[in-house]
């Protein structure tokens, strides 16, 4: 089975010295990928991926236990977006500027949302869906890439 290799590189030179680094991760045993470019209309929330116990649970579902890598990229060169990472009972949101990405390493037992400023580091919940919404009155295009193993 194929391997997925991801590389993140930061490169900045300050006073003649490189202050960035490169980190590479290899995930073995990839059996499936999900890649989609989604047009997200202005002022609307668009579900860009759903996760479940099995792929046959619902149309387009990705098996949560097998997910090992997710990248969501705002392909707009002008407009920002918000991303909702939704669990069974809670969610968290992040702002993604034009051209930037948000990376997750799995969906099974991955997130915990709280309404205070003191992390409990409690029991993590599964991610049920990922949703995107443009922040301005303009459309954005979002790319999502998911890689899964047999789990």
Image (tube, grey):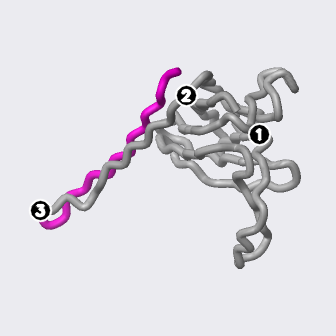
Q: State whether residue 93 is above or below residue 148.
A: below
Q: Which residue lies furthest to the left in this view?
A: 16
Label 2 crowd bin: few (<14), some (14–19), many (20+), radius 10 Å = some
Q: Where is residue 53 in the image (x, y as percent from the top left)?
A: 82, 34
- Is residue 112 in sight in this rendering? yes
Q: Residue at x 70, y 52 (%)?
A: 110
Numbered label attached to residue 129: 1
**What is the CA distance from the residue labelled 2 to the residue labelled 1?**
24 Å
Name the residue beneath numbered marker 3.
Answer: 16
Label 1 crowd bin: few (<14), some (14–19), many (20+), radius 10 Å = many
Q: Which sits earlier in the primary sequence, circle 2 or circle 1?
A: 2
Numbered label attached to residue 29: 2
Answer with the quarter of the image where residue 130 lies: top right
Q: Which residue is drawn at 55% across and 45% down?
A: 103
**What is the CA distance from the residue labelled 1 to the residue labelled 3?**
45 Å
Q: Which residue is drawn at 56% across and 27% down?
A: 30
**What is the CA distance from the residue labelled 3 to the residue labelled 2?**
41 Å
Q: Which sits earlier in the primary sequence, circle 3 or circle 2?
A: 3
Which quadrant, please, contains the C terminus?
top right
Question: Magenta residues?
Answer: 1-16
Label 3 crowd bin: few (<14), some (14–19), many (20+), radius 10 Å = few
Q: Is mark 2 on a helix, strand or loop?
A: loop
């Amino acid at each position: 089975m194929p391997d997925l290799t991801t590389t993140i590189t930061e490169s900045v030179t300050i006073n003649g010295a490189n202050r960035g680094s490169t980190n590479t991760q290899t995930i073995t045993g990839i059996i499936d990928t999900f890649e989609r470019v989604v047009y997200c209309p202005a002022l609307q929330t668009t579900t860009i991926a759903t996760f479940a116990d099995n792929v046959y649970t619902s149309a387009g579902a990705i098996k949560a236990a097998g997910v090992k890598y997710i990248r969501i990229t705002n392909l707009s060169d002008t407009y920002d977006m918000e991303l909702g990472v939704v669990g069974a009972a809670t969610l968290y949101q992040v702002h993604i500027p034009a051209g930037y990405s948000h990376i997750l390493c799995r969906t099974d037992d991955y997130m915990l949302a709280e309404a205070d400023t003191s992390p409990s580091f409690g029991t993590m919940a599964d991610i049920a869906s990922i949703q995107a919404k443009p922040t301005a009155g303009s459309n954005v295009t979002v790319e999502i890439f998911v890689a899964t193993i047999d789990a």
